[in-house]
Amino acid sequence: MSIIDDLIGLQEEAEELHKLVVQIRERIHRMLYQEWCKWTHDDERCWKTECGAAICFKDGGPAENRQKYCYHCGRIIEVVPAREEDVDNDCD
Ligand SMILES: [Zn+2]
């Protein structure tokens, strides 16, 4: 394999890396500028995300499950309360 082939290979790798860097940079930008993904309480266990996913927890909501970022779009989660206040009265 010649040096030219090595260089071409390196250039291709660099182009792939550049694409990744661009994607990561966009993601970081969204986080830094604090664009939020609104999570709406859908039913007892499930939340509808602004970016179009449905996420269900076994217990509690995003905060109780230590979810800060939407795992669908990577933005910070903003919890939108349910229409009726969900009073936590589960004393057995
Ligand atoms: Zn999202």
Image (cartoon, grey):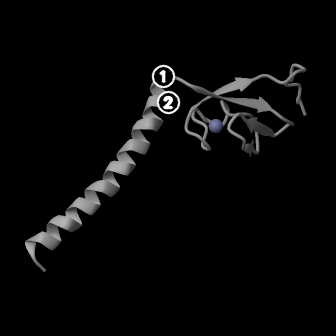
Image-quadrant location for residue 7: bottom left
Mark 1–mark 2 contact, CB under 8 Å? yes
In this figure, which residue is indicated by the disc labeled 1? Answer: 33
Q: Position of residue 17 (x, y in %)?
A: 32, 53
Circle 2 Cα neighbour tier, 10 Å, few/some/many (<14 / 14–19 / ≥20): some
Residue at point 81%, 40% (across, down): 45
Q: Which mark is residue 30?
A: 2
Quarter of the image with the C terminus is: top right
* 74 in relation to 90, above or below: below
> Mark 2: which secondary structure?
helix
Q: Is residue 6 left or right of residue 37?
A: left
Front position in the image: 59 or 33: 33
Q: Amino acid at mark 1?
A: Tyr
Quarter of the image with the N terminus is: bottom left
Indicate the quadrant of ligand 1 in the picture.
Answer: top right
Q: Position of residue 16 (x, y in %)?
A: 34, 57
* 13 in relation to 33, above or below: below
Q: Amino acid at mark 2?
A: Arg
Front position in the image: 51 or 91: 51
Q: Position of residue 63 (x, y in %)?
A: 66, 30
> Mark 1: which secondary structure?
loop
Q: Is residue 46 left or right of residue 32?
A: right
